[in-house]
Amino acid sequence: MPGDFLPAFFILNPNRYFWKKYKMSSFIDFGIAQKQYNRMNRITQLFGTKYPIIQGGMIWHSGWRLASAVSNNGGLGLIGSASMYPDILRENIRKCKTATDKPFGVNVALLYPNLEEIINIILEEGVKIVFTSAGNPKTYTETLKKEGIKVAHVVSSVKFAIKCQEAGVDAVVAEGFEAGGHNGRDETTTLCLIPNVRKHIDIPLIAAGGIGLGSQMRAAMTLGADGVQIGSRFAATVEASSHENFKNKIVELKEGDTQLTLKELAPVRLVKNKFFHDLENLYETGRNIEALKETLGRARAKRGMFEGDLVEGELEIGQVSALIDEILPVEKVFENLIKEFNEAKVDLSL
Ligand SMILES: Cc1cc2nc3c(=O)[nH]c(=O)nc-3n(C[C@H](O)[C@H](O)[C@H](O)COP(=O)(O)O)c2cc1C
């Protein structure tokens, strides 16, 4: 049983629960444990989920099938709108509504086109949760919140986490340099980012980047996160809409097989395939942005992750891929995460 997630008798008598469970020897210990528990509750309470686990929006991966499977298993599934034409997004939202009666949301990456149209569809379809990313948190937070939508925004630095809080978001996702997909330029790791962001903001904090095991989830929460956002682990699931070639590639990847590149345009962590090396070769002949843009061309991400071209396509995935050995159904990913999370309680008192 996922014993760490809000057992009913804890709600009735929290003090007794912690006293018995952790055999706390001082009020100080007790205070820390209770504070951490309350923080964890903030994500499940905010989004109405069973677990504080969010499946990050992912281009070419997170359609209604993945999002609804995550929500049905107790997490928060997010439809990734960035790879969808507006009418495809509408269709995905409608299908998700029929596939789950649990909360789900939409990720809107603010650097992609058709933003107005995407936001209108979200409002028209009555979506209740939106995660924005890759842009200014002020752009849509007020509009969305006026309609009663819960808003979270993804950042990679303390500076932008503070901006999110000022913009009035309900939660911040702080994403470390290990993460798959687009990333910050500063290369701040999750281990350093989370406690620093925690120090500077009070609102619910979700850790992302390098989390694929329950032990990593527990570590992120020990650092001060209230919950976690996971991308790469969910990319290698049966329900992800990406090509089988790419899913099989994720399983094969070893330590050092991905790298952050394209810092001049939009930094992104990629598999080191031919396409990646073509980009890197351009660096040797000088950092010419036009040449980079030309090599990047159009639809490289679709070609790699959706059409399965492992040579010429852009393959986005995180460092945690080195720990992913199997393509699994979402249900099994949840079973593993919760089991590992509960087993990772190690008494390391010094
Ligand atoms: C293939 C892939 C595509 C992604 N696409 C998006 C996206 O469209 N919008 C976004 O906000 N984040 C995107 N991300 C980031 C994820 O939502 C998530 O924050 C990240 O994967 C967490 O790190 P992890 O990969 O180490 O789990 C993507 C990540 C991956 C692996």
Image: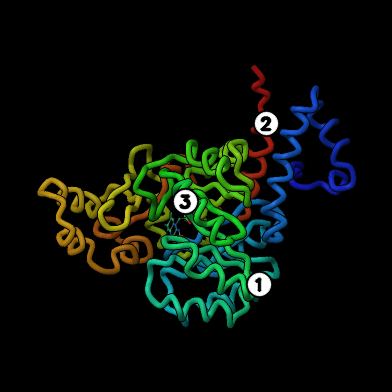
Nearer to me, 144 or 95: 144
Q: What x and y, as percent, mark residue 258?
A: 34, 45
Mark 2 highlights which residue?
345
Q: Residues within 10 Å of mark 2 (few under 14, many from 20)?
A: few
Alpha-carbon span between mark 2 and mark 3: 24 Å
Nearer to me, 163 or 120: 163
User: Is residue 214 visible to the viewer in this orientation of the structure?
Assistant: no
Q: What x and y, as percent, mark residue 329?
A: 57, 55
User: Is residue 247 visible to the viewer in this orientation of the structure?
Assistant: yes
Picture quarter with the N terminus = top right
Q: What x and y, as percent, mark residue 52?
A: 65, 51
Mark 1 highlights which residue?
148
In the image, residue 74 above or below residue 79: above
Of marks 1 and 2, the one in the foreground: 1
Quadrant position of residue 39: top right
Q: Does label 1 point to a residue whose CB lies under 8 Å from ligand 1?
A: no
What residue occupies the far front of the structure in this picture? 166
Please give the name of the residue rendered at 73% of the width and 45% of the height, measured from the top-left corner.
38
Nearer to me, 149 or 79: 149
Q: Does label 3 point to a residue whose CB lies under 8 Å from ligand 1?
A: yes
Classify residue 289 as left or right of residue 217.
left
Q: Residues within 10 Å of mark 3 (few under 14, many from 20)?
A: many
Taking the image in four quarters, ligand 1 sits in the one at bottom left
Of helix, strand and loop, which one carries label 3? helix
- Of callouts 1 and 2, the N-terminal one: 1
